[in-house]
Amino acid sequence: MKLPNSIKELAQTLMDNGARAFIVGGYVRDHFLGLQSKDIDIEVYGVNSLDKLKSVLEDLAPVHEVGKNFGVLKINLDGYDLDISLPRTEIKTGKGHKGFHIQTNAQLDYTTAAKRRDFTMNSIGYDIKTDFFLDPYEGRKDIEEGTIRHVDDDSFVEDPLRVLRAVQFGARFNFKLDTKTLELCQDMVKNNMLDELPKERIFEEYKKLLLKADKPSQGFELLDELGALYPELKALQAVPQDKTYHPEGDVWIHTMMSIDAMAQLRSKDKKKNLILMLAVLCHDLGKPEATKEEGGKISSIAHEHILEPTISFINKLSNEKALLEEILPLIKEHLIPSQLYKQKSKDPAIRRLSTRVSIEDLVTVAKADHFGRTTTEAKKKKYPAGEWLLKKAKKLKVQSEQPQALLLGRHLIDEGMKPGLEFKVILKEAYEEQLEGKIKDEKSALRWLKDYLKP
């Protein structure tokens, strides 16, 4: 396995101190998957204490002790984030993924140390000194066969977070769960063990699913198979849609196709990607309540304004209010690009839209919604409404933000006015005129103000 020189030097320094370094976990797994990673886990054998290990590492780089309670030290070498630990065993002492007593043991053999790993593909070790892979649980074979298989029955079920790890790994690598592993995960869900997890940890696994998988739908289908799908998403199943606009099937099928489409539209901006992926995932959560079938016709009028299911779902993942503040406008407006295009709306409508939502982001969400179906136009991977709206918005310079007010408080003061309630009224009215295109620059804003203040 090719390694940066800095890692080889680290291994040599440890050997000079009577220790031996093994690369373990995800970095080794990703090597066999042909993936690049900047995160490396190293297990160090032959050092009797974490303090001794720390003193050796401090000669190479600053050491961070944020994981010390779990027997882990963190350093950065040449842009690689290293988690360096001693081999350890874990004894279950409480609920959740943190309810363990960690016992380090420098003399532990690799097979015993690797037994605490979740899946065989994560149990492979690499001996830097001998350039040799240690694979006591046949992880390489499972990687070749595309199988996610747990290492040990007893230790696996002690950590409910592993259910969600199985889900995001399955979607990211297009792997299938081993039958026994699937059954253990289902048992953990039935026993309500996921309720032991803090929402922050759950959200981290959802983020990996939404941001790293080419087809996040595979993860959500697996969540459904495990019985771990949140009710807001489960409610989408079997909700019918008008076949003219949605020949692909029910709302669940459309949503799964849409998030896969959104995954292909992701940019390098991880924060924005998360907002957009969640918006697409939630964009039709209002349909179960809104959908009606009358006279053989199916409709879901105003479903985009039924936001309670989205609020409920997001609150199960995060306490971040800012998250909802960014997601909800995208859901409320996700039909607008097509509506404006159909109506061939004028500039004022587009300016007003920019005051409610980022038009660039909205077009991306609407595009994923459009591509998440099997209509002829969607299959062509073209979304004329989005292209039209974005072109108009860019011309008006409102594609990513609303117009900046041209008439300001200082202009009113210059006219001899004193700050007060009237200020707000005048500035609001002036901004409305600006959105309408009647105020185009500062000069016309001042002219409008003079006319407004005439007795």
Image (spheres, rainbow, N blue to C red):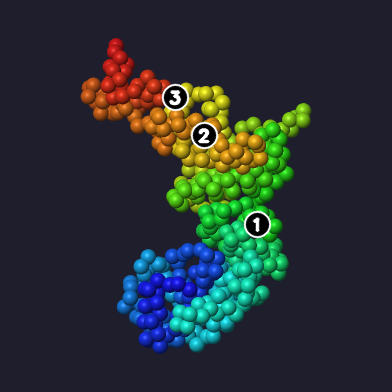
| Left or right of 16 in this view: 297 | right
Could you tell which of marks 1 and 3 lies nearer the N-terminus?
Answer: 1
Please name the residue shown 48% across and 73% down the image: 1
| Left or right of 359 in this view: 379 | right
Q: Nearer the viewer, mark 3 or mark 2?
A: 2
Which amino acid is tagged 3? Asp
Residue 436 to residue 80: above or below: above
Residue for badge 1: 223
Which amino acid is tagged 1? Leu
Q: Crowding at label 1, few (<14), some or many (≥20) Cα neighbours within 10 Å?
A: many
Please name the residue shown 47% across and 23% down the image: 346
The residue closer to the viewer here, 319 or 270, is: 270
Residue 144 visible in this rendered orientation of the protein: yes
Q: Alpha carbon of mark 3 to alpha carbon of mark 2: how far?
A: 15 Å
Residue for badge 3: 347
The residue closer to the viewer here, 203 or 197, is: 203
Q: Alpha carbon of mark 2 to alpha carbon of mark 1: how far?
A: 32 Å
Give the quarter of the image for residue 85. bottom left
Residue for badge 2: 386
